[in-house]
Amino acid sequence: MKLINIGFGNIVFANRLIAIVSPESAPVKRLIQDARDRGMLIDATYGRRTRAVLITDSDHVILSAVQPETVANRLNTKDSESDKAEDQERSAGIEEDNDEMNSDMELADE
C-alpha cells in the first residue's frame, strides 16, 4: 500500500492513480467540469491555484496545488523506498530461514 502526499496533508493511494496531468489544456478543463457535474471531483487545493490534476481508476478527478513533476517525484521516491524495504524484508526472511535450517541441522547432528 503506497501513499502519496499531494499537498496540504492530503494523501492518495499510489496504486489507484492512472495519470497526473497539467490543468491548462482544454480537454483537461472539460474533464474537470465533467467530474464536477458527476460529483466525482475532489478539490485538494485549499483555495490555491490548481497545478496538477490526478485521475484515478475509479474515475475520480483530484485537483492538487502541487506541480505534476513534484507529485511524480514523490511517487517515484515512494516506489524506490518501498522496493528497498521489501528487499530488506526478503533478505531478513532468507537469513531467518537459513538460521532455522542451521539450528535444525545442529539438533539432528546431536
Image (cartoon, rainbow, N blue to C red):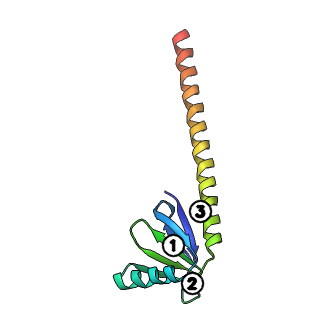
Q: CA distance from mark 2 to mark 1?
A: 11 Å
The picture places residue 79, in percent across and down from the top left corner, at 59, 55
Residue at image position (36%, 85%) is 37
Cβ atoms at labels 2 and 1 below 8 Å apart = no
Count of numbered marks = 3
The quadrant holding residue 47 is bottom right
Q: Secondary structure at mark 3?
A: helix
Q: Nearer the viewer, residue 93 or 100?
A: 93
Q: Which residue matches tag 1?
A: 54
Q: How far is the residue under mark 1 from the one under mark 3?
A: 12 Å
Secondary structure at numbered mark 2: loop
Residue at the image point whose x is 43% and y is 85% from the top: 33
Residue located beneath label 2 in the image: 50
Q: Position of residue 12 (x, y in %)?
A: 49, 68
Looking at the picture, which amino acid does disc 2 mark? Thr
Q: Which of labels 1 and 3 is toward the front? A: 1
Furthest residue toward top: 109
* Residue shown at 59% from the left, 87% from the top: 49
**Quarter assignment of residue 71:** bottom right
Q: Hey, what amino acid is under mark 1?
A: Leu
Residue at screen point 52% across, 70% down: 11
Within 10 Å of disc 1 (Cα), the crowding (few <14, some 14-19, many 20+) is many
The reply to whether residue 110 is in sight is no
**Residue 44 got which mark?**
none
Name the spot of residue 63 as percent of width and height, x first. Answer: 51, 79
Where does the C terminus fall, quadrant-wise? top right
Residue topped by disc 3: 75
Left or right: 66 in relation to 107: right
